[in-house]
Image (cartoon, coloured by chain):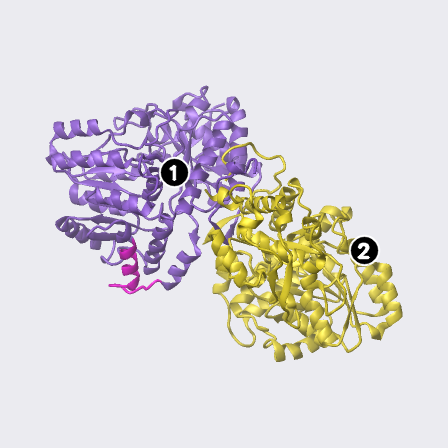
Amino acid sequence: MSGLEFRTIIEPFRIHSVEPLRLIDQEARGAAIRDVGFNLFGLQAVDVLIDLLTDSGTGAMSRDQWAGIQRGDESYAGSPSWYVFLGAVRELFPFRHVIPTHQGRAAEKILFTAIGAPGKVVPNNTHFDTTRANVEFTGAEAIDLPIPEALAPSLEHPFKGNMDVAALERLLEERGADAVPAVFVTVTNNSGGGQPVSLQNLRAVRAICDAFGVPLFLDACRFAENAWFIREREPGQGDRPVAEIVREMASLVDGMTMSAKKDPIANIGGWLAVEDDALAERCRNLLVLTEGFPTYGGLAGRDLEAIAQGLQEAVDHDYLRYRIRSTAYLGHALVRAGLPIVRPTGGHAVYIDARELLPHIPPLEYPGQALAVALYEAGGIRGCEIGTVMFGRRPDGTEEAAPLDLVRLAIPRRTYTQSHIDYVIEVCSAVAKSGPQLRGLRMTYEPPALRHFTARFEQIT
Amino acid sequence: MSACGGQSSRRIAAVPPYKIKVVEPIALADPERRSEALAAAGFNTFLLRSDDVFIDLLTDSGTSALSQQQRAAMELGDEAYAGSRSFFRLEHAVQEVYGFRHTIPAHQGRGAEHLLARVLVRPRQLVPSNLYFTTSRVHAELAGGIWTDVSIAEAGDPESRYPWKGNIDVAKLEEVLRQAGRDGVAFVRQEACLNMAGGQPFSLQNLAEVRAITRNYGVPLILDATRSSENALFVKRQEESYANLSLTEILQLIAALSDGAIFSSKKDHFVPIGGLVAVNDDDLAGKLRELVVVYEGFPHYGGMSGAAMEALAVGIHEAADERIVTHHLDQVAYLASLLDDSDIPIVQPPGAHAVFLDAKRFLPHLSQTEYPAQALAAAIYLAGGVRTMERGIVSGQHGREAYDGLELVRLTLPRRVYTQEHLAYTAAVIADLHRHADQIPGLRLTFEPATLRFFQARFEPLAPFTLRHLITSGRPVATKILR
């Protein structure tokens, strides 16, 4: 059986229905990217061959999820689909109150409106961009407290998503428990490279929150991938079912926000769950203002069904093994091809270190953007710059280099086959070889906020 | 996914021209369960429950993945009994892609074959054909016809690498027609990507010659065009003068060289159900329409729902998309190359829709009356949960006549369903089994139905038949891969 020991995993599903991919030639791609000012967010999706912009809402649902969609009950109040949803959420996250929202950021909006205010501070291992925006919108301060290892891309660490417990303790001592309405832990840590948080770290954070009497919340978008990493990497966890690990994660916190577009493999949806009755009532009052009645919260009955089914599939071991190994497959292949990536590979994406790959392009000429544009021009692959374009503009109006210039290749769940990924590897290798010829970019239009979505660029000659 | 090692230079499978829209979970039953399931199925893979199957390569018929356009079109299905909008869309698609004037819908291919045999075959008339297909032959014989093989010799030689094994032996055909005369022959049938020879194509040149002879004798030429898309792509790749034509243009050339065609749309057209007869002649179309009402349904639906006709109309266009057909052929070639690398005896060259294992060479210790292909199909299921199909003496022998023909196991690839890794797994299972081939026992027939016996026949092994008996060294491959 020589060689076979290394063949580790095959897709634990077969294809039930397909979506055609359109191949446009290099010339047409060049024209398309020039038309949108070298900003990949401006591209029409039909001009993209392999779309790795995000893993959010872009996964392939299962036959059983589609069956749920057909079954969806659209009663305004008390729909059977709501109870199916509620049961599926509580099976993994047994909180007293589950509040459905149309997607994750709506859950954040409601929670932070209820608990945030000027003078307050919300610590997080690392805030996701919409989380930070929702915290800051209430006048509160969003503070990232990752462990120091998280900031060194090439450093291997099994739980790079962990929170710096000592830093959290210092913050709570300095600012006082009254100033901290909640501590947040994001699993997996998306902005830090899709890196997991250990149970041990979560327990330590819990102990500090208990000592100061501060509630602890999970931003749980990628809870299943995080639990799989715990099972694989944390001592003593190797024999536990993922669902049980998830329940333990839930037992360590007082509530959660959730985007169902990630691990539950739905195209839309989210929820907020809390234990506290008074907080739940305040949140529900906000919910009916902006989202919908508490038994649907802005989601159709069919969406509730798809999420409920997706939650069961999300904790399936065969699926998670395939999911995490496929991401690692891309990461390992890029390392072999000589590309610098954030290590170890995370759950949902591979992050290429563009500043390291393109040392001749200074950060203010946006090496991440230049690399993302090159991947599109060479092979129709759409990634996402996470670097100076996204974070370079300071509140005081100055521009400076972000800590890292990365290109994120996020992998939609169950959507692309290994052949597609092999193609991505080929394109990345070719682009890396031609790296010295890549040119930086100059921003020709900059919107006042969240500039990465709509900025325009030109290539520096 | 392979965790290490570089890109294989032998890798043929190209980037699929689609991404996945909906998935369907699959799981490998444990060896004890597989063993029980196989015994309960009388060692006949047709009788397994699909829940017990991991990778299902039994057939490419009705098992393909629909596209989102097909699913969307199904929502538009017009279920009117007569004059359905969906029928006219189907008729239009057949005219646009193949150029046949009349479309008579049927619930599937054998429904179409039945109508055609009823209309064209009179008792004692011959039906000359390249080899045979099980249901086509039965319908011709039930109408009193006599099946006559006019395939070329290479069609029956699994080791021949001749690229056009689907060709008709023109001299043999001429001889048959000369002896029987115009009235002694019902129609000549030529099958695209000849299933029983391993999915092997005919050349356009051969079809033109067959056309000339049938015209000379005034005998209708009917295509089994079920896998004509793949045949057209072989023509484009292997027949120089057609290299610059589009797939649609080649399909139209093929159709124009015939008087009509039957289609099982469950293959090239991706749909789970549906078929049709397409003809140009008004009288013939009229006769077929008279019968379709009796056996299938009103001529505007013929046993298909409006939704099914909509999915079929879209599928007909997709079956003329060169990128889609190329990917299917390349997947078959990829699986064949993996097996060939492990020195597994397969029919060469690989055909359109399937890779065929040569059971006589795989199991040289068994005589053909011990049903080697049936035994091999059973062993492949036991070893890795992969379901394949016997294409040998069980399905090929008719009555008591002696049979020493091909003894094959068919690994059929549903279109757009399995990924490269599923195929790599399948190849690994078979390669592992090949090393222990001498452990595979023959079978004895314990129940034999009167017609089409391969569907429901039951068998017993001549010696113990468990995974432990088959694979004695180390853990079975399936366990290794999934750990």
Left or right of A390 in this view: B172 = right
Residue B20: image location, x then y, percent: 49, 49
Magenta-colored span: A72-88
Chain A drawn colour: purple
User: Which of the two residues, A130 or A199, is positioned nearer the viewer here?
Assistant: A199
> Secondary structure beneath disc 1?
loop
Q: Is B479 on the left or on the right of B362, as rendered?
A: left
Among the 4 quarters of the image, the one containing residue A62:
bottom left
Query: Which type of secondary structure does the marked residue at label 2 adopt?
Result: helix
Residue closer to the observer: A206 or A302: A206
The residue most toward the top is A360
Q: Residue furthest front?
A: B463
Is B255 above or below relative to A360? below
Q: Which chain is yellow?
A: B
Residue under circle 1?
A: A347
Judge whether residue A87 is colored magenta.
yes
Give the residue at mark 2: B153
Q: Quadrant of the C terminus of chain B?
A: top left
Q: Is residue B197 left or right of residue A426?
A: right
Kindly indicate whether the residues beneath marks 1 and 2 are on one polypeptide chain: no
